Amino acid sequence: MSSPSSLLSTPLVEALQDTDDPPSETPLPEEDVEDINVSEKRANPESETLPAAKRKAKTTKIPSDILQKRREGRARAMASLQNKLNELGIKRTDVENDLVFSSIPTIPLINQKNYYTDYLKKDDQFKMTRKLKNLSSIKEKLTSPDVEAEDEQEGDDDEKSQTIVLHPGSSTIRVGLASDVDPHLVPNLIAYQKKSETSQTFERDPKREVVNGDITVDDPDFTKTGKIITSNFKERMKYYKRRILPNSQDTCYNFNKRQQPEIIPEHNDVHRIDYTNPDAKFIVGEEVLKLKDESNWVIRSPFDSGKFHDLSSFYSSFQEILADVENMLSSIITDILEIDPKKISNYNCVLVIPNLFDKTYVETMCFLLLNSLKIGNISVIQEGISATFGSGISSGCIVDIGAATTKICCVDEGMILPNSQVELSYGGNDITRALVKMLLNNQFPYGDIDLNDLSDWNLANELKEKYSTFQDADIAVQMYGFVSRKANQPSKKYEYKLFEELMIPAMGLFYPDFFKDGSDQRRVLGKKSSAQKEVDVLNSSRVLPKHSDYVSGTYDNPVSKLQQFEQLGKLITLMEDDAVLKTLKNIDDENFQVSDDASDEKLNYTPLDLAIIESITCASFNDKNRMKRLYESVLLVGGSSLFNGLDLILIDRIHIWRSKLLSSNLLDDIVKQYEDEVTPAVQNMLINSTAVPIEILSSSKEVNPSSMIWKGGCVYSRLKIINELWISLDDWDMLGSRCLNQTCLFNY
Ligand SMILES: Nc1ncnc2c1ncn2[C@@H]1O[C@H](COP(=O)(O)OP(=O)(O)OP(=O)(O)O)[C@@H](O)[C@H]1O
């Protein structure tokens, strides 16, 4: 039913209001006109700026005949309103008792000239700062003036040992107390007893064919890139006056083909592994590698490339990933760090996250550590910054070559420089795979090696770590041996000869097409093929929710232009080709379009040397001094930076690239064709960088480069400022991820 008031149409309401106005038949006296002007000015300040003629026009009095017509109109409206009200039986009280139409007061506009607020402008308005002040005042009260300096020192030491530093990696989780010299290395593996008899069968990895006893890995792209690398390898050996015997490869091939394994009796195998059949619901880390019967277990790796593992064929839901992470971390805390779960709230935790972090990952980890694992306080730090803390430098280009990824960024004065971060989609795992493919092509005597088998995977990694090198002097035909150990099988000793396999797989870092691999039958997690990684990128929204901005709803993970400018690398790579001009002209613009959508994650296969040049170029745009500083401190960290001679080859290759780029006269064509941000970056790189010397900081005597980032987390936990950066569960409950905005040394 419509309310009576809704029957009052707008003109009628206006009429009602107008009836109470005093009639103004007689012209207003001069002072009144002046008053009207003043009130009009107040209501409409704009009128002050009107020219005098116009103002006069505005105050002109209304002729009396028009006023008369208006009054008649109002009277008619009133009469018709009265009739309507009579029909409905409503009494018009507002007129009868002289009340105003509305009792809601009109709110005057704020004078914008004097408008002022200090909302969110003072530190005190942030809860985190207030909490800190309270804490320090409590501390002050508790500390009596006669406490000796020695006691203070002891207190500090206690605090140090109460901090856990956690750096989850694709292959290894590095964890330990801040007071430890080295971290515990926990393989990123968790295994559950199978509930049902389901089993998934996988093809042997890499795929191979055996014809007349000869093994070949059928991978045309691998063979094609392999040839390019081999010719470069030979050129390099020639340049450094190293002799290569023409039949080196044949010698190895024929020797390996004749080899038969030697069975080692169990009592003679000093390094035999004690395989177990544990009765636990789940096992973690090294324990997984000692399983007697793997077929009864489901093996997974929850961390991958600085975020959660996201391959939908292994994880069907986000909750499953969370359960794995929680089980794994709680088992690490109790069994490896030997911390009593009841006392865990006395501990703090520094979590090391990637430079281009995934917010879903970071926030979930924070919540998990605080809420599920009940750790007292947490703080987060980026890998790049942590590496500088670990190595004691304040600026540099940090190159972290890990197992699944290679991350590069430039740090200056404790901050990661914008657009200098890049994450390459290859790492040590790809080198291992390439090595195995090469070994098989060279009739590796253990022809059944299968990278889907954990023990074989570890064996391949071991061979790579022991023998791969970039030192030209070490490259010669040599005989090597290894023992293959498997549960329920006798250990077997093999001998084989190697030559170019010592260097070529690792040279894939400079020719990453060598690592592209179409296999989607990869069982061992964290060791995905490029095809699987592609599926991952496509599926990422299915298992892991994508983080988005609360207000705009858009994707809001940190981005770097360099990560998106894959074409910068492509462009430079193209210049290597003589036919580049022709190619450039034929390239349609689509191939060079930068994606506006930052969520459009893709794999990045830019060669390592170029990625370093690009990162430094983007970081030191128009700042020659900064460029010099960065080139003079290229810091190599991560497990795969341990290849002997990597620093030397990297210096060579960066020099070669820079002079090649400068001598190239193709620059003008590129400049003309691509006039967006890519062009100045290339230009700048070419013109400024060639004369700058390069210095690679690779190995440190005190800290192993593979644990440098973890060590940086320990240094961070001892900074004085850390007291201002801890987040507790109370903070998280109240502010959620917003407390990261105020407690990170970087923009969250
Ligand atoms: N001495 C060595 N020489 C060459 N490679 C090595 C050596 N030691 C370890 N590696 C390789 O380093 C890789 C592991 O490095 P690291 O522990 O830094 O990776 P991660 O942090 O687990 O992975 P990611 O950074 O990709 O998440 C493995 O591929 C391993 O084979």
Image: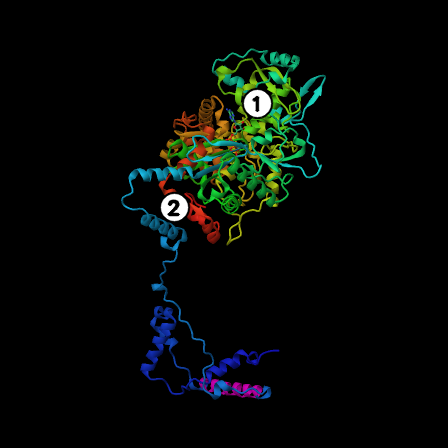
Helix, strand or loop under label 1? helix
Q: Nearer the viewer, mark 2 or mark 1?
A: 2
Tell which of 142 and 64 is nearer to you: 142
Q: How many marks?
A: 2
- Image mark for residue 724: 2
Residue 647 position in % (x across, y down): 45, 24
From what the image shows, is residue 212 above or below residue 222?
Answer: above
Q: Could you classify mark 2 by the number of other residues whose Cα lies within 10 Å: few (under 14), some (14-19), or many (20 or more)?
A: some
The span from disc 2 to disc 1 (Cα, nearest Å) is 53 Å
Residue 219 position in % (x across, y down): 65, 26
Q: In the rendered image, is residue 65 in sight? A: yes
Whichever of callouts 2 and 1 sits on the residue coming sooner in the sequence is 1
Residue 510 position in % (x across, y down): 52, 27
From what the image shows, is residue 84 above or below residue 360?
Answer: below
Query: Is 535 in the magenta?
Result: no
Q: Which residues are magenta?
A: 66-85
- Asked where in the image residue 501 lies, by quadrant, the reply is top right
- Image mark for residue 228: 1
Helix, strand or loop under label 2? helix
Q: Amino acid at mark 1?
A: Ile
Q: In the rendered image, is residue 617 in sight? A: no
Secondary structure that dominates the magenta span: helix
Tell which of 272 and 182 is nearer to you: 272
